[in-house]
C-alpha cells in the first residue's frame, strides 16, 4: 500500500468540496480485502462503515508504522450512526485498538493518510522532536451544503504522532 502524501489528500478534499451537499458514500469493512480478517470483524462488531471521498478509489483505510518502526499498524475511519472515529490497530491485531480522535457526525468530510517517517514534522510545541516512525495526516473539512461551493467551507489538517502511547499534534516543515 502506498505511503502518504499530505498535499494529495488536501487536493482530494478540495475536489470533494465542489460536490457540495453530497455526503461521503459509506462502504462496509468487508469491502477492504487488504484489511486483516480480525480487524474486519472488529469493525463490523462496532457497526462501522468507512467514509469514501472518491468514487473510483477506496480511501480512509491505511497502513503504516504508526506506533513502532518496522511493524504494520492499520488506521481506519469508522463511521457509525452518531460518530466517526479514527481508530489505530496496533500490529494488525484487533485486540489492540486505539481511538485517536472522534467527531460527531454532521456535514463534513474526513480523510486520513500516512506520513512516512522522513516527512513527519520534527517540532512539538515549537521545540525539536525526535521522530522514529510514521505519522498520520488527518484533514476534516466543514461546510454548509446549501451555501454554495468552496467559499463556504473550511478545513483543518493535523499531523498526529504517537509519542510513547500518547497521540500528539506536531507542527513544522514537512520535507519531501
Image: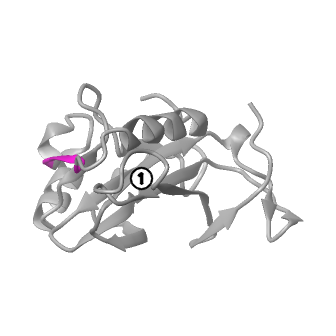
Q: Nearer the viewer, residue 160 or 166?
A: 160
What residue do we see at 27% from left, 69% from top? 105
What residue do we see at 13% from left, 48% from top? 28
Residue 27 is a magenta residue: yes
What residue do we see at 29% from left, 55% from top? 145
Q: Where is residue 138 shown, x and y percent of the image?
A: 50, 54
Question: Left of 32 or right of it: where is 14?
Answer: right
Q: Where is residue 85 shown, x and y percent of the image?
A: 33, 66
Q: Circle 1 sits in a helix, a strand or a loop, which is it?
A: helix
Q: Quadrant of residue 160?
A: bottom right
Q: Nearer the viewer, residue 90 or 62?
A: 62
Residue found at the very far right of the displayed protein: 127
Counting every numbered tag in the picture gives 1
- The colour scheme is one colour
Label 1, on which residue?
91
Residue 164 is a magenta residue: no
Q: Where is residue 124 shown, x and y percent of the image?
A: 78, 66
Q: Quadrant of residue 156?
A: bottom right
In the displayed structure, would residue 130 be above or below residue 127?
above
In the displayed structure, would residue 66 be above or below residue 30?
below
Question: Left of 124 or right of it: where is 63?
Answer: left
Question: Left of 81 or right of it: where is 112?
Answer: right
Q: Quadrant of residue 162?
A: bottom right
Magenta extent = 23-28
Q: Where is residue 39 shown, x and y percent of the image?
A: 23, 54
Q: Nearer the viewer, residue 13 or 68?
A: 13
Amino acid at each position: 500500500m502506498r505511503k502518504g502524501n499530505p498535499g494529495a489528500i488536501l487536493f482530494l478534499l478540495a475536489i470533494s468540496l465542489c460536490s457540495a451537499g453530497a455526503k461521503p458514500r459509506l462502504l462496509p469493512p468487508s469491502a477492504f480485502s487488504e484489511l486483516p480478517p480480525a480487524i474486519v470483524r472488529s469493525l463490523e462488531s462496532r457497526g462501522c462503515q468507512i467514509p469514501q471521498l472518491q468514487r473510483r478509489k477506496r480511501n480512509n483505510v491505511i497502513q503504516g508504522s504508526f506506533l513502532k518502526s518496522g511493524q504494520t499498524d492499520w488506521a481506519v475511519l469508522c463511521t457509525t450512526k452518531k460518530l466517526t472515529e479514527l481508530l489505530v490497530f496496533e500490529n494488525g491485531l484487533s485486540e489492540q485498538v486505539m481511538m485517536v480522535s472522534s467527531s460527531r457526525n454532521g456535514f463534513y468530510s474526513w480523510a486520513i493518510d500516512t506520513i512516512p517517517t522522513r516527512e513527519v514534522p520534527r517540532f512539538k510545541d515549537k521545540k525539536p522532536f525526535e521522530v522514529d516512525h510514521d505519522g498520520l495526516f488527518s484533514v476534516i473539512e466543514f461546510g454548509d451544503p446549501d451555501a454554495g461551493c468552496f467559499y463556504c467551507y473550511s478545513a483543518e489538517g493535523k499531523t498526529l504522532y504517537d509519542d510513547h502511547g500518547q497521540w500528539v499534534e506536531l507542527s513544522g516543515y514537512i520535507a519531501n
